Amino acid sequence: MAKYTKEAILQMAEEEDVEFIRLQFTDMFGMMKNMAITAGQLEKALNNQCVFDGSSFEGFVTIEEADMFLHPDLDTFAILPWRPQQGKVARLICDVYDREGNLYAKSSRTILQKVIFEAKAMGYEFEISPECEFFLFHTDEDGRSNECNARQRRLSGSWTAGPGRKRAARYGADPRRNGNRR
């Protein structure tokens, strides 16, 4: 049984003051991409009428067959909690279809759905979820990470002042020319 209907999504978006909706899909390599639309375009999106240029994504299609359609999976509708209270942002995960109306075979979401269906037919059941990663860094007074600053010092120091000059000369580079050979 479906979690949401088109009408329920339109009503929630209006009641919750959703201003933008991210139509998310995965490229051939499994990387999440998205197309942002306004709340006024949501009904069009829910009717599978949002088109994007598939030739803009590596491995998708050639320029001659560029029109690709996003079909939102209604059950994936969610209002993003980290956005402002007014003018909120929601998301829908979409399947990619070609202009003939077929699921696009090179979409990693389509491939995954096919494998799950085949495995289920053999008696297997999968539980799949994304693995979200993030990194926390200490920052300096300018908001740059200390790790980034240390790396930058290591890279720039090897061809500038101090011990870097000796190293540059030892490897046959002129330190005044940023490491270029003589």
Image (cartoon, grey):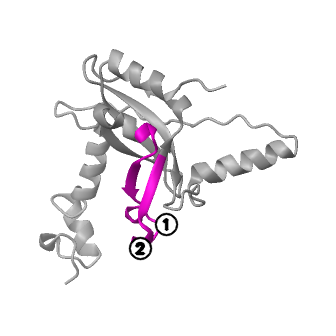
Vertically, is 131 above or below 171?
above
Residue farthest to the left, as pictured? 176
Start-end of magenta stretch:
45-70
Neighbour tally class for label 2: few under 14, some 14-19, many 20 plus, Cα within 10 Å = few
67 to the left or right of 40: right
Looking at the rendered structure, which numbered label has been put on residue 59? 1
Q: Is residue 27 visible?
A: yes
126 to the left or right of 65: right
On the image, the x and y values in percent for residue 109 come to: 59, 48
Looking at the rendered structure, which numbered label has been put on residue 180? none
Classify residue 85 by image quadrant.
Answer: top left
**Cβ–Cβ under 8 Å for marks 2 and 1:** no
Residue farthest to the bottom, as pictured? 182
User: Quarter holding the C terminus?
Assistant: bottom left
Q: Which residue is mark 2?
A: 64
First in sequence, mark 2 or 1: give its number.
1
The label nearer to you, 2 versus 1, is 2
50 and 117: which is toward the camera: 50
Q: Secondary structure at mark 2?
A: helix
User: Quarter holding the N terminus?
Assistant: top right
Q: Residue at x 42, y 35 (%)?
A: 135
Residue farthest to the right, as pictured? 123
Say whether residue 62 is magenta: yes
Q: Is residue 81 visible?
A: no
Q: Type of residue at label 1?
A: Gly
Vertically, is 174 above or below 132?
below
Say whether residue 63 is magenta: yes
Classify residue 10 by image quadrant.
Answer: top left
Vertically, is 53 above or below 170?
above
Q: Residue at x 41, y 73 (%)?
A: 64
